[in-house]
Every structure is written in structure tokens, then in C-alpha cells.
Amino acid sequence: MKSDEQNAYFVINLLTARISELLSERNGLSITNAMRELMATKTYAVLSRPQSYLYLESPEYILDMLDAERRQDVERWLEV
């Protein structure tokens, strides 16, 4: 694995932890349940692929994507 790819996965893991933390606080979930909820989304599928470069965005931006996905607002999801 290239160094750049390793760095991308490191950032993706940090973002996953932070977003799970934010979901936990916002929705009153345990960290484990928040992480499960996050990892079951299309947004996470995109985030987990370094080629998407979504890991370069802020946790709040990714939360906006999650909210749009939950509302099934595909246009907003793609726009964000």
C-alpha cells in the first residue's frame, strides 16, 4: 500500500470515529450503535473509498450528506 493511500485510510478512520461521536451526541446513541448506523449508509460507502476524496471534507459536511441520505434527498446528497 502506498503512503498516500495509508494516509487516506488513517484520515477515513479518524473521520469515522468523529462522525460516530457526533451522531451519538446528536441522537442519544451509544458510540457502537452510532458507528453501526453510519457504516450502513451509502455515504459511508463513498467515504470509505479513498478515490472519492470525501475524506478531505469536514465531519459536518459528511453529516449533511447523511441527513440528505436519510431524507432520501438524492439531489441534495449529490450536491453536498
Image: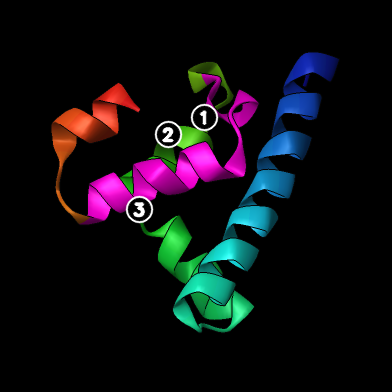
Q: Amino acid at mark 1?
A: Arg
Magenta segment's dominant SS is helix
Q: Nearer the viewer, mark 1 or mark 3?
A: 3
| Residue 50, above or below 24 | above
Q: Amino acid at mark 3?
A: Thr
Question: Which of the 4 image quadrants contains residue 9?
Answer: top right
Please name the colour scheme applied to the rendered image.
Answer: rainbow
Q: Quadrant of the N terminus?
A: top right
Spot occupied by residue 23 in the image (x, y as percentages of width and height):
52, 66
Which sits earlier in the primary sequence, circle 2 or circle 3? Answer: 3
Spot occupied by residue 59 in the image (x, y as percentages of width and height):
59, 44
Q: Quadrant of the C terminus?
A: top left
Residue at which label 2 appears? 46
Spot occupied by residue 51 in the image (x, y as percentages of width and height):
53, 17
Residue at which label 3 appears? 41
Q: Camera-side residue: 79 or 10?
A: 79
**Residue at x 37% of width, y 41% of height:** 65
Distance from disc 1 to disc 2, alpha carbons, whole Å, reads 6 Å
**Residue at x 49% of width, y 37% of height:** 61
Which sits earlier in the primary sequence, circle 1 or circle 3? Answer: 3
Is 57 contained in the magenta span?
A: yes
**Residue at x 62% of width, y 51% of height:** 16
Question: Which of the 4 image quadrants contains residue 76?
Answer: top left
Report the magenta residues as a range.
53-70
Distance from disc 2 to disc 3, alpha carbons, whole Å, reads 9 Å
Please tell me whether mark 2 sits on a helix, a strand or a loop: helix
| Residue 14, above or below 5 | below
Could you tell me if the residues under marks 1 and 2 are in contact, i.e. CB atoms within 8 Å?
yes
Q: Camera-side residue: 21 or 32?
A: 21
Residue at which label 1 appears? 49
Which residue is farthest right? 3
Is 55 contained in the magenta span?
A: yes
